[in-house]
Amino acid sequence: MKKRILVPIVGQGSIIHIIRTGMLDKMRTFCEPVVALLWNQEDLVEELKAKGYEVTFIPPYNVSTEYLQLKSKINIWYINHKLKTPSVSLQQKYLAQFKKERFVKKFKKQLRENVYKLRFKLQPEYINRLKAEENEQIKNQNCYQVYVDWLKQLKIEGLFTVTPFLAEVDLMARILKLKGTPILASIYSFDNVTKRGWQSIVFDRYIVWNKYNKAELQRIYKQLEQDSLITVAGAPQFDFHYNENYAWSKEEWMNRLGIPANKKVILYSGGPVSLLPDEPQYLKALKEAYEEGKISKDNVILFRCHPLDKVERWKKYVGETDFIVYDSAPNGEKKLDHVNVTDEDIMKLMSTLKHADVHINVISTMAVDGSAFKKPQIGPYYDDVHPSTQDLFRGMYHQEHYLPILKTETVNLANNREQYIEFVNKAMQNPSSYTTNCSKCVSEIVTYTDGQSTNRAVAAIKDFFVQ
């Protein structure tokens, strides 16, 4: 009998990683996947059921304010005593300038946090008391017994997830681990390990992109010091980059996106509004340079909106014109991430990366995606909207997960607007001089460039569950 393995699908990332790569179909050869959706996506449900998959829905995660406050205290300890990464501070300092909090409220919040930091330092045993309290409180939350009953009803014999940091997944994982049920996590994105908060449990085994993710996990969790507990498999979602079947011809791509024929394409990949609220300034700088004749009329600008953003905010700030093509991403109605991602959506992205001539992005994984297609990578490294706090923006490039990219010198950092436009023009004229380190960047971050990362991950999943 094949084991019944619970596979949570909680957003666009898990759809791409697990379903679109073919990972789920490969898994069913040695186990019985039970797909658990976080939201009701009718077309996705119908697709999965048509293939014979069992589909269930993750119960609502309802916890009290008191429990969340307790968890936030533990998270302060986790960030300062376990995670120990500069990324958290760099991001907090940058985003703090956009928060409209009164000074007194902000001061009190910082004071409370400092008190807890000091207490964790002076009383090492304090965290054990908090963890013990959390372990009791979670069992008294309304959702706990609901999850226990749900998992029992489904007769789950294992858990595989690419989102171990999500509260709903963490809860189901801790319940299953308490019963001795095997649990396995594959880290969806290379920044997840250092950008997520405290988890209640450590998974039995992990699958990661690269040596950096492995080292991060082993630094944080002593339980993972044994190398066999972490498999470096590469990034399954990068298999599409090496599959010619996932790219349209240049002519079809231009027709589908409404890009004028016989034009070179400057691609700007936008970031999420939650992290980069002032980012539209860089697209506007391109527009103004174009209007001033500083960028050739032989070019057109293609803007790709981030899946966790809406294209309207860019159009409002930058304006619409015939030399900017806006390409919006699919968004969920209630939550941006809760939407299906089809093969056609992936083909559009792969075609865009393949056929664009120059690629601009800010502190993004897209720098690696673009490098896989050997396109010049340009990153604005200045802030004209908030010049007095420009160093805070620059600090975002020096987060732990992004440093390996910077060290490959693949991304050409523009220190000011003039250099930004200069880089764009030179890269358009002589792209090969800007792509010498692209292969190094991809190998450093994704590890493998053979298009077989899904197969490696599936082999690790099978090895774990089929004993």
Image (cartoon, helix red, strand yellow):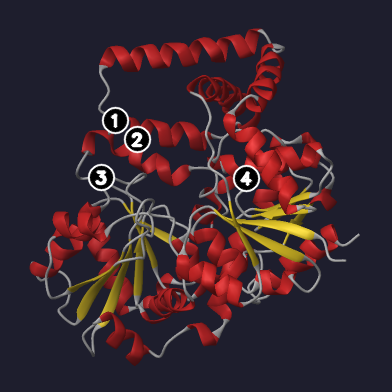
Q: Which residue is mark 4?
A: 169
Tell me, for residue 95, which label it has, or none. Answer: 2
Q: Residues within 10 Å of mark 1 (few under 14, many from 20)?
A: few
Front label number (3 vs 2): 2
- Taking the spot 77% from the left edge, 59% from the top edge, the residue there is 4
Whole-percent x, y for residue 425 in the image = 25, 71
Residue 149: name its quadrant: top right
| Quadrant into which the C terminus falls | bottom right
Contact, CB < 8 Å: mark 4 with mark 1?
no
Whole-percent x, y for residue 83 in the image = 62, 33
Q: Which residue is mark 1?
A: 99
Q: Residues within 10 Å of mark 3 (few under 14, many from 20)?
A: many
Q: Earlier in the sequence, mark 3 or mark 4?
A: 4
Contact, CB < 8 Å: mark 3 with mark 2?
no
Residue 427 visible? The answer is yes
Amino acid type, label 2: Leu
Q: Residues within 10 Å of mark 4 (few under 14, many from 20)?
A: many
Q: Earlier in the sequence, mark 3 or mark 1?
A: 1
Q: Which residue is mark 3?
A: 383
Q: Is residue 179 left or right of residue 141?
A: right
